[in-house]
């Protein structure tokens, strides 16, 4: 195997690892976001956990962040809560930073 082949395999492995970390960070973010939203919606215990799991699935089965944001906004509106898109986006950003640190162990 040539040095070029070894470097290419190393690059591909790093790319795969980075993508896995990114997926795990977004899943973690959505779980934290789901628990935050569940508290706002008055859910606790298993109901909060189920809501958070549903939010993780919304990202996987939908249009990523847009699906998550849309679901949260619809749920907040249906519950009569005045939580804006801006507030949801801000919480998503803050929790993604936290989740990334959680998943990488602070390495990034």
Image (cartoon, grey):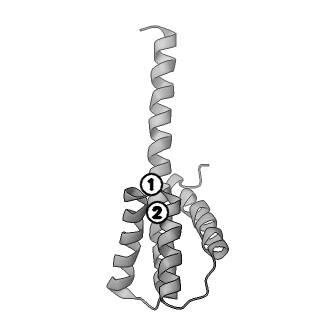
Q: CA distance from mark 1 to mark 2?
A: 6 Å
Residue drawn at x 46%, y 83% is 38
Residue that badge 1 annotates: 24
Residue that badge 2 annotates: 28
In this view, the residue in front, 101 or 89, is 89
SS state under label 1: helix
Residue drawn at x 59%, y 55% is 106
Tell whether label 2 touches label 1 (CB within 8 Å).
Answer: yes
Which quadrant is the N terminus positioned in?
Answer: top left
Tell me: residue 85, above or below residue 43.
above
Q: Check disc 2: other Cα within 10 Å, few if <14, some if 14-19, many if 20+.
A: many
In percent of width and height, residue 56 lies at 40, 65
Residue drawn at x 46%, y 13% is 5
In percent of width and height, residue 69 lies at 53, 68
Tell me: residue 91, above or below residue 3.
below
Residue 95 quadrant:
bottom right
Point out the residue furthest to the top here. Answer: 2
In percent of width and height, residue 67 lies at 47, 63
SS state under label 2: helix
């Amino acid at each position: 195997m040539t040095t070029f082949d070894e470097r290419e395999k190393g690059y591909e492995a790093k790319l795969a690892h980075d993508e896995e970390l990114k997926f795990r960070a977004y899943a973690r973010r959505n779980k934290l976001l789901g628990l935050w939203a569940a508290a706002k919606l008055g859910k606790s215990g298993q109901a909060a956990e189920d809501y958070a799991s549903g939010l993780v699935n919304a990202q996987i089965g939908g249009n990523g962040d847009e699906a998550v944001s849309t679901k949260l906004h619809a749920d907040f509106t249906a519950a009569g809560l005045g939580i804006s898109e801006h507030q949801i986006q801000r919480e998503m950003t803050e929790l993604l930073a936290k989740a990334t640190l959680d998943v990488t162990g602070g390495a990034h």
